[in-house]
Amino acid sequence: MRLSSDYYQANDGGWSLWLHREKWQENLWQVVVRLIEKQPSSKHPQTLQIKAFAEAGGEALFLKVFHGCSGVAAIKDIFRDSKAFRSMRQATALARHNFNVPITVAAGEKRTYGLLRKAFVLTSGVEGEALPTFLRQQGADAPGISLVEKRNALKHLALEVRRLHELGFIHGDLVPTNIFVYRSPSKEACFFFMDNDRTRQYPMWVPRTLWRRNLVQLNRIPLPGVTLQDRMRFLGHYLGLKEWGKKERQLLVWLERKTRRRRTDCDSVDSSVSFRQLMRWQGELK
């Protein structure tokens, strides 16, 4: 695996590690290992906050633990990097293109005769909150957040997602909870792309159809203060439109159909109501 010179490779107790030259601290290793060993095996990754270093005046750190798969997936893992190493590689690639992502402090994987047993990625915390939490705390009509600021932020996010796709990146799970928002002192919104272990960068010759999956992921969850008109504005900025043509309207129909299906499958809601009602914020996160 190729990384920038910010990282160096190490091995310890069967672990193959990549460590950030400036961020990594030797006293972190025993803390990380103990936390990994305490986690029961699960098909889903587990994310834990390492609070001791933040309480001591250091930065917040988050540990994501992956467990080895079984069956066909286990065979595939013999011939590919772990999700932890893929997450580190993609975060580094995104940062190289000036996207905001958490800094990867360390990543490691443990194998037995090539079979992946465990893996982890350790990242630094970022300022801000997950998009749904930020909107719920601030409120669209809260003092200090004007309509102009809201629409500027909407446009900025749309253009960042568009730039992501133009560079060949497809985020693995671009749901609103994986977008963190930081509001700067100048009241400008800064967006961070989180959880990049399933993000991929495809060659430019690959057909640009995979990006639609990200639009469905972004569109699926009702959000406080976000109206149907806001969703239309986002898509218009993303597509760079001044007018809606036949092709763009076909995309709208497709996006609504997929969103309805996802809301039924994921949230078990009645999707037969009007789309405006379906996407209206009801006071809770799904």
Image (cartoon, rainbow, N blue to C red):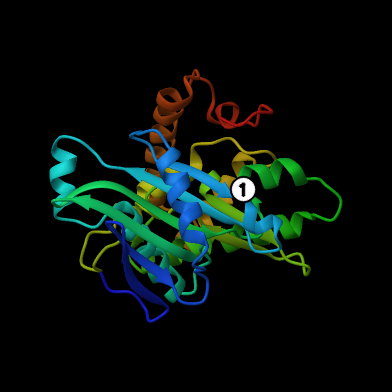
x%, y% of residue 40?
Answer: 39, 33
Q: Residues within 10 Å of mark 1 (few under 14, many from 20)?
A: many
- Of residues 45 and 172, the one nearer the viewer is 45
x%, y% of residue 213?
Answer: 36, 46
Q: Amino acid at mark 1?
A: Leu
Left or right side of 43 for 229: right
Left or right side of 159 for 85: left
Give the quadrant of the N terminus: bottom left
Q: Which residue is mark 1?
A: 131
In this view, 138 is above or below 237:
above
Give the quadrant of the C terminus: top right
x%, y% of residue 278?
Answer: 55, 27
When asked about the image quadrant of residue 69, the answer is top left
Tell me how many marks there are. Answer: 1
- Of residues 240 and 113, the one nearer the viewer is 113
Q: Residue at x 39, y 52 (%)?
A: 120
In this view, 95 is above or below 234:
below
Is residue 82 visible in the rendered structure shown here?
yes
In this view, 96 is above or below 91:
below
When asked about the image quadrant of residue 199, the answer is bottom left
- Of residues 194 and 212, the one nearer the viewer is 194
Q: SS of the residue at dot 1?
A: helix
Taking the view exactly as shown, the residue that stands out farthest to the bottom is 5
x%, y% of residue 20?
Answer: 45, 72
Left or right side of 56 for 264: left
Q: Residue at x 48, y 65 (%)?
A: 105
Is residue 244 visible in the rendered structure shown here?
no
Q: Residue at x 14, y 55 (%)?
A: 79
